[in-house]
Image (cartoon, rainbow, N blue to C red):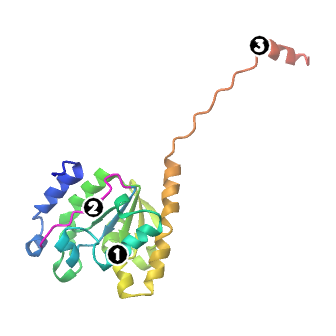
Amino acid sequence: MVDITPLGELAREIYNCQRCGLYKNTTNAVPGEGNPHAEIMFIGEGPGYNEDRTGRPFCGAAGNFLTQLITSIGLKREDVYITNIVKHRPPGNRDPLPEEIEACKPWLDRQLEIIKPKVIVTLGRYSMARFFPGVTISRIHGQSQKCGEYTCFAMYHPAAALHQGSLRATIEADMLKLPNILEDIRKREQPAPIPIATKPPPQEARQLNLFGF
């Protein structure tokens, strides 16, 4: 069945993207997947080998860890939206280049416009640099700040825990902060209660009170 939703239409454009040279040596574009109305949007760096083969984001070992992290806060992958800064796999899983990130920027911008997440979770330093320019991930991880109309929350990439086991507990602890951040946003977005007008006392009662009766 053809997906005629805005995200489905956007995915078809991404599949045909030739804005940079990454598409030349890949099997599949990896637009992203998840809830089109997600309150939380996870943005990684770029697809890896498994993602390139399947066309799905975060489906390898790092993806399994991300799924565990999402489950730890009472959600499923289907409840959130998951994508990357670049939509094709960089050769040999190298870091994405600045010109590749810039070429993919319109795709991510449109995903944000369609989904309108309450919280953007950046996974890794290249994703972080888009929303937290000029800072290091070791200093900013586990913290949220307003980035334009979005609240952004920086985290280490899940793959970091696979290469450096000591980071696993840090990543898990950072993830557990998300529910409170999301709840605070929901409370701020609630409309202020409309005050209930009270009826003034009858005119006769007000006049009697003037004389102390």
Check disc 1 and give the amino acid type.
Answer: Asn
In terms of sequence position, does the residue under pointer 2 or pointer 3 come before the other? 2
Q: Nearer the viewer, mark 1 or mark 3?
A: 1
Q: CA distance from mark 1 to mark 2?
A: 15 Å
Of residues 31 and 2, the one nearer the viewer is 2
Helix, strand or loop: magenta stretch: loop
Name the spot of residue 143 as percent of width and height, x first: 47, 69
- Residue 213 placement: quadrant: top right
Q: Quadrant of residue 50?
A: bottom left
For numbered disc 2, what is the local secondary structure? strand
The quadrant holding residue 130 is bottom left
Q: Earlier in the sequence, mark 1 or mark 3?
A: 1
Q: Which residues are magenta?
A: 27-38
- In-front residue for pair 186/35: 35
In the image, residue 83 sits, relative to residue 91, either above or below, namely above
Residue 176 magenta-drawn? no
Which of these two is toward me, 17 or 203? 17
| Numbered circle sitting on residue 33 | 2
Q: Secondary structure at mark 1?
A: helix
From the top left corner, tell me how far across and down residue 198 is, in percent.
Answer: 68, 26
Numbered label attached to residue 203? 3
- Across and down, in percent, residue 79 comes to 38, 58
Residue occupied by mark 1: 64
Q: What residue is rendered at 31% in x and 79% in y? A: 61
* Label of residue 188 in the image: none
At label 2, the amino acid type is: Glu
Kindly report the distance in space between the C-alpha atoms of the residues bearing marks 2 and 3.
Answer: 65 Å
